[in-house]
Amino acid sequence: MPEILALLQNIAPLLEKPTLRQLSHVIFGMLAANGRITMLGLSRWTEKGGSYRSIQRFYQSKLMWSEIQWVLFRLRFLKPADEYIGAGDETVISKAGKKTHGLDRFFAGLQQKAIPGISFFTFSLINVNEEHSYPLQATQIIKSVEEKATSKAKAEARKVKPTGEKKKPGRPKGSKNKDKQAVILNPELLRIQTALKSFIATLGVFIALKYVAMDGHFGNYPSAWMVRQENLHLISKLRSDAALYTSFEGEHSGLGRKPKYGAKIDFHKMDAKYFKETSIEDNLRKDVFQGQFYNKEFAFALNVVIILKTNLVTKAQAHVILFSTDLDLAYDKIIKFYSLRFQIEFNFRDAKQYWGLEDFMNVTETGVTNAVNLSFFMVNFSYALLQPYRQFDPDYSVLDLKSGYRGYRYASEILKMLPEKPDAILLAEIFQQIARLGAIHPALQPVSSQ
């Protein structure tokens, strides 16, 4: 408990004293709880002062979560000499019932289908040197009526069976060239752009962010244009069947406009001038190529990295296409930055597995916002609690941390039943021994008394 209060002093100026006290009880309950993280469960695991009504009042308080997350990060984790990139991704939380704020149907990647639930788009800062992600902002996705109608119309259109008529070759009669420079963002990208502006404003002058990594869902021109509007560069992935072209290098005949596109890239027969490196592991050869290529959906050239994988036994090949809007970024940086994007998925996993992101039963807008942001806050807060332990044992995990606080809770209840408290040395040994009972690693298991 003392270390919780010490860490909370970093954000104390942002909270009223009753709210800060309630937050300390909620955090202790989350650390000690065994099972689902709900308001009722937290009230059972907190010590004195953590009644169910107190926890209800906390979840209905309006809190400045972006500022709270940023202040904790700046005072506990920020290392100005290290390199940082941004990462953005959506997480879907399954929910039953009909009253949860923002309830709709969202596509869940793990289940590969649309499910009823709520969705939040999260931006995090990734320390490139540490390869660790810190979630700082979570924005709920609320679909408008027009957006729902458009999605429903598209779904109905996909259900219509084709008539069997073949599409005529060539451009439709009367079609005109489209201005690729003028982009109209769809509602999804408009929401993300607003969240990105808020995220950049939160960082202020402390971090000069340059790159944002997003998954293949954002490997398109509107997403790249949206990120460039905020003076950032996008790092993402193109579809494996995306068509890429070199710039035109032949002689112009003088008739009409000079061609923009040259030869189409064959990913399985890349020119040697684009080759960067190769490696072989377990009969799998990986060749890396880099070049500035065009895609006809983009109005500008892309810095593209092609990773061609070849099975030396079966000769089967597959490729991955990564890209950046920064034409000067080295290929190894593009690969590393995009791979680090996956660190935000670990934030989602920890928030759901340990901190109640899938468990809460709040239905109001304030309650849902607090429950989700508290889960992401605990991802960072628990990492701060783990650091002193990992100086002595790098394998010390979240489960070990929760085991320690659960043991502390058990020991506190047992000691209340004793007529007299033992001396301080024996008391410390009791707490330490009980705290180790649920530890994962052998080095942290209780020492046998035999």
Image (tube, rainbow, N blue to C red):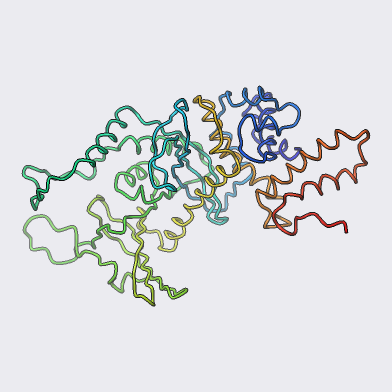
Position of the N terminus, as image quadrant, is top right
Is residue 256 placed above or below 49 in the rendered structure? below
**Is 417 located above or below residue 380 in the figure?**
above
Q: Nearer the viewer, residue 399 or 65?
A: 399
Residue 84 pos. (x, y %): 51, 50
Residue 237 vs residue 445: left or right? left
Residue 151 place in picture, x, y as percent = 29, 35
User: On screen, 382 above or below 129?
Assistant: above
Residue 397 shown left or right of residue 255 in the figure: right
Q: Is residue 285 left or right of residue 179?
A: right
**Measuring 51% from the left and 26% from the top, which residue is drawn there?**
363
- Numbered marks: total: 0
Q: Percent x, y for residue 112? A: 39, 47
**Residue shown at the point (34%, 58%) measured from the top left:** 303
User: Which residue: 88% across, 43% down?
Assistant: 427
Q: Is residue 245 above or below residue 100?
A: below
State the residue lying farthest toward the bottom. Answer: 313
Nearer to me, 17 or 46: 46
* Residue toward you, 156 or 149: 156
Residue 279 occupies quadrant: bottom left
The C terminus sits in image quarter: bottom right
Q: Position of residue 212 (x, y in %)?
A: 43, 48
The part of the image, by quadrant, that contains residue 385 is top right
Residue at x 43%, y 29% (from the top left corner): 102
